[in-house]
Image (spheres, rainbow, N blue to C red):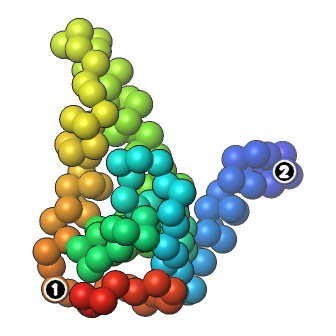
Amino acid sequence: MQDFLRSDLFLLLMLDLALWLWVWVVPTLVLRFPLLPEGILGIALPGLVLVRADALNGRLLRHELTHIRQMRRWSPLGTALAQAYNYILRPLWSLLARRRWPGMRELYFSNPLEQEAFAAMDGDGPLPRTWGARPPDL
């Protein structure tokens, strides 16, 4: 038991627990961030949403806040593992089974986490608590 408490896995699980509590307790900070790579309109991190200043609108914010809800549901580590599965293991399986490596666009749009976030974009349900930048259409 002592070895487990000192292991890297234990530290990773404690970090995940701390981030999970953070995502549940602290309202998400939404920041306009002009330095996102071309083609990326927003990104959700535990407790933080970065959105391109010229792209901030209610639909995009709903999309990114759906990812925050996913982190609340499965923990930040659980969500990261789901993304690793979707972007690493699934393409490897496709390569082995069909001898074809899917493109990033195909992986992105077939990712169940992204499909849930896209479905939420046109919803009108309540958003999680946020602070920071707010689009005018909300």
Q: Position of residue 9 (x, y in %)?
A: 70, 47
Q: Pointer 2: what residue?
A: 6
Q: Residue at x 20, y 43 (%)?
A: 110
Secondary structure state at the residue bearing disc 2: loop
Q: Give the amino acid at mark 1.
A: Asp
**What amino acid does circle 2 point to?**
Arg
Question: Would you say residue 1 is visible in this rendering?
Answer: no
Whether residue 67 sits left or right of residue 59 in the image: it is right
Q: Position of residue 31 (x, y in %)?
A: 52, 75
The quarter in which the C terminus is drawn is bottom left
In the image, what residue occupies the spot 65% across and 57% down? 13
Q: According to the image, label 1 marks what residue?
A: 124
Q: Position of residue 67 (x, y in %)?
A: 37, 65
- Name which residue lies at 44% across and 40% down: 84
Please report the residue visible at 29 percent of the width from the left and 55 percent of the height from the top.
Answer: 113
Please name whichever residue, 7 or 98, is drawn nearer the observer in this view of the structure.
98
